[in-house]
Image (cartoon, rainbow, N blue to C red):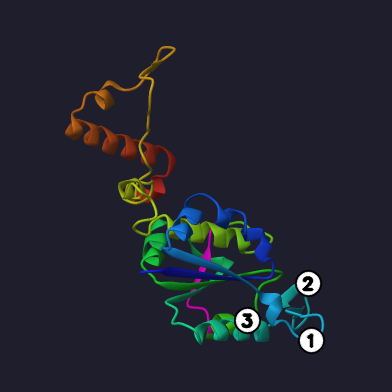
Amino acid sequence: MMHRIDIISVQPKLMESPLNHSIVQRAKDKGIVEIVLHDLKQYGLGKYKQVDDTVYGGGAGMVIRCEPVFDCINALKSERKYDEIIYMCPDGEVYNQRTANQLSLKQNIIILCGHYKGIDQRIRDEIITKEISIGDYVLSGGELAAVVVADSICRLIPGVISDEESALTDSFQDGLLAPPVYTRPADYKGLKVPEVLQSGHFAKIAEWRENQALKITEERRPDLLE
């Protein structure tokens, strides 16, 4: 099943590089994921393709208008059914691995990037099905946040990563941070890999990793254990 992510933005070029390399590009090359960037200004009003206007009631900043967003999203919806229409914004639900897992099961997703002072509330009320923030800070726009979401979704879709177990053992998949990992050499200038990892005893290795994950989570992110 082909997965499709449409991203709407006033600055789509900001996303071209990160979405054309590494795992995301691999997903596209395999025909597993299609990511399409849309320039909202193509749906802008008048000679200058206006997409924003001043705030009703006064105040600083500009707000994205209804017309360009409604027209763009309605055009996309006329071509296919979408499972989610996501708005990237500072006051949305804080993104986590559970949400990434849920979104990776969706076939078609639209991501609308916030910009300026935000979007007209009527867009949020009438079109948006999910609002997401990637953290308690403000970016210049939702483009980088949209890339984060797209990347996290793509790597979870079966067939994208050759070793699918790798994605399933990432941090947060089981509610814990990942345990330490090591590779060759076993002894680097007196710094040694834990003996249990070299033992070949998979049950003991699994127990060690679980204990380490719990220890690290307790130290660094005790809130995850609550």
| Res 46 label | 1
Amino acid identity at mark 2: Ala
Local packing at callout 3 (Cα closer than 10 Å; few below 14, some 14-19, many 20+) is: many
Q: Residue at x 39, y 55 (%)?
A: 160
Dot in front, 3 or 2: 3
| Res 69 label | 3
> Residue tagged by mark 2?
60
Residue 138's quadrant in the figure?
bottom right
Q: Which residues are magenta?
A: 127-135
Image position, residue 35 (x, y; %):
52, 66
Question: Which secondary structure lies at badge 2?
Answer: loop
Amino acid identity at mark 1: Gly
Say whether disc 3 or disc 2 marks the residue closer to the N-terminus. 2
Left or right of 26 in this view: 122: right
Dot in front, 3 or 1: 1
Local packing at callout 1 (Cα closer than 10 Å; few below 14, some 14-19, many 20+) is: few
- Between the C-alphas of marks 3 and 1, the distance is 15 Å
Dot in front, 2 or 1: 1
Amino acid identity at mark 3: Val
Residue 57's quadrant in the figure?
bottom right
Image position, residue 179 (x, y; %):
35, 37
Q: Residue at x 53, y 58 (%)?
A: 134
Left or right of 129 in this view: 47: right
Q: Which of the image's four quarters has the N terminus?
A: bottom left
Say whether disc 2 or disc 1 marks the residue closer to the N-terminus. 1
- Between 30 and 133, the residue placed more toward the observer is 30
Q: Residue at x 55, y 59 (%)?
A: 147
Say whether disc 3 or disc 1 marks the residue closer to the N-terminus. 1
Q: Is residue 145 magenta?
A: no
